Image (tube, rainbow, N blue to C red):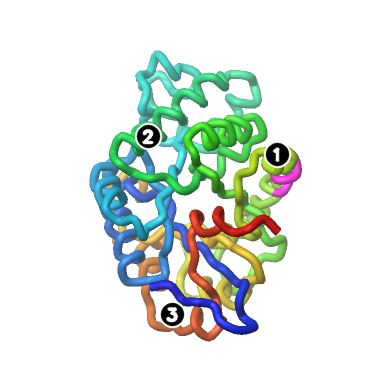
C-alpha cells in the first residue's frame, strides 16, 4: 500500500528495494511476503538464481511490483556457456567467489569487457523471455560501479530500455543505530571514489538514479532498530533503501555463510511500527519507474 504525500511533507520519497529475488526459495518467498505485507516496493531479480522460475512467474503477473535486474558476475554459474565467458569463471565453470577475487583478476587485465557485456545482456534477455518488465538495474556487491563495468552497464541499460539504476550515494556518517563492523563502515570509501569517476558518464546517459542510498552499513542486518534509524533520516528527494528479507536459510544452504538476518529484516519491513513511522514522517513509498517518470529538476 502506497502512502500519499500531502502538505509540507511532500517530496520525501523512498524506494524500498530487496536484492537477491530469485536467488533461493526462502529469500524469494520472503521478498514476496515483504511486498504483500510490508513496505517493500521493488525487487532486483537474479537471472542465475535457484528460484528464478518462482520469482519470474510472480514478477510477470504483478505489475505493481517494480522488478529490476540484479546483475551477477561473482558467485554461482553464468547464463552463457563456459567457453563464451572464460575470463569470468573458474576452472569448474562458475563465477569467482566474491569481490576481492574478481577485482584482483579485473585489475590485472584478466577480465574481457566483451564477455561481461555478453553475460549481462544474456541475463537481461532471460528475464525478458520470462515476461519480466525491468524497471531498473543493479548488481551483486555493487560491481556494476567499477568504472569500466559502469560504462557497460549504462550501455546495456539503454539498449534494453532500462532508464533507472542504482548509484549508491552513501551517507558519509555511520548511523549509530545501524549494526555493522568498522570494516563495513569504511567500505563505502571505494563507492565514493567510483561515484566521482562515474558521474560524467551517468549524467550523459539520461538514466535516472536516486538522490541517496541507505542500508549499506546494515547490509544483511537491517533489523527494526536499524530500519527505524534510516526512516527518521530520510531527506527530501528520492532515496533508495536496500534490504534483504527472507524466511531464513537452512544450514545446508550455499549462502548460509553470509550470516544475514533475513528473517529479522522481513519482520522489520512488515511490522506495524514501521508503517506508523512511514506515516508519521510523511514518507511516500515509491518505485524506480515512478522516479524515472519525474520531471528533471
Position of residue 108 measured from the top left corner of the image (x, y, whole percent): 64, 21
User: The magenta stretch spans which residues?
Assistant: 192-197
Say which residue appears at 67% left-offset and 55% top-offset: 296
Which marked residue is nearer to the observer: mark 3 or mark 1? 1
Residue 132 in the figure: left or right of residue 281: left
How far is mark 3 from mark 2, CA to CA? 36 Å
Q: Secondary structure at mark 3?
A: helix
Q: Return the residue at label 3.
A: 275
Q: Secondary structure at mark 2?
A: loop
Residue at the farthest top position? 83
Which marked residue is nearer to the observer: mark 3 or mark 2? 3
Residue 261 in the figure: left or right of residue 292: left
194 drawn magenta: yes
Say whether disc 3 or disc 2 marks the residue closer to the N-terminus.
2
Which residue is more in the foreground, 36 or 290? Answer: 290
- Label 2: how many residues lie within 10 Å, few (<14), some (14-19) or many (20+)? some
Q: Secondary structure at mark 1?
A: helix
Q: Return the residue at label 2.
A: 76
Amino acid at each position: 500500500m502506497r502512502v500519499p504525500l500531502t502538505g509540507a511533507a511532500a517530496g520525501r520519497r523512498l524506494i524500498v528495494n530487496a536484492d537477491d529475488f530469485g536467488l533461493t526459495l526462502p529469500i524469494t518467498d520472503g521478498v514476496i511476503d515483504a511486498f504483500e505485507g510490508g513496505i517493500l516496493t521493488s525487487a532486483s531479480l537474479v537471472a542465475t538464481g535457484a528460484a528464478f522460475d518462482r520469482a519470474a512467474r510472480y514478477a510477470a503477473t504483478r505489475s505493481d511490483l517494480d522488478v529490476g535486474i540484479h546483475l551477477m558476475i561473482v558467485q554461482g554459474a553464468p547464463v552463457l556457456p563456459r567457453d563464451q565467458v572464460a575470463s569470468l569463471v573458474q576452472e569448474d565453470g562458475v563465477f569467482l567467489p566474491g569481490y576481492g577475487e574478481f577485482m584482483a583478476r579485473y585489475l590485472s587485465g584478466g577480465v574481457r569487457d566483451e564477455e561481461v557485456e555478453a553475460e549481462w545482456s544474456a541475463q537481461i534477455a532471460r528475464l525478458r523471455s520470462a515476461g519480466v518488465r525491468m524497471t531498473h538495474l543493479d548488481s551483486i556487491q555493487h560491481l556494476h560501479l567499477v568504472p569500466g563495468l559502469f560504462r557497460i552497464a549504462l550501455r546495456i541499460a539503454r539498449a534494453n530500455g532500462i532508464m533507472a539504476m542504482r548509484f549508491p550515494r552513501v551517507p558519509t556518517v555511520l548511523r549509530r543505530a545501524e549494526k555493522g563492523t568498522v570494516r563495513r563502515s569504511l567500505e563505502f570509501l571505494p563507492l565514493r571514489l567510483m561515484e566521482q569517476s562515474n558521474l560524467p558518464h551517468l549524467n550523459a546517459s539520461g538514466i535516472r538514479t536516486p538522490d541517496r542510498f541507505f542500508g549499506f552499513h546494515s547490509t544483511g542486518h537491517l533489523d527494526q532498530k536499524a530500519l527505524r534509524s534510516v526512516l527518521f533520516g530520510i531527506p527530501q528527494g528520492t532515496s533508495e533503501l536496500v534490504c534483504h528479507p527472507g524466511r531464513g536459510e537452512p544450514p545446508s544452504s550455499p549462502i548460509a555463510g553470509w550470516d544475514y538476518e533475513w528473517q529479522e529484516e522481513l519482520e522489520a519491513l512488515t511490522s506495524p511500527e514501521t508503517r506508523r513511522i512511514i506515516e508519521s514522517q510523511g514518507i511516500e513509498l515509491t518505485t524506480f519507474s515512478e522516479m524515472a517518470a519525474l520531471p528533471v529538476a
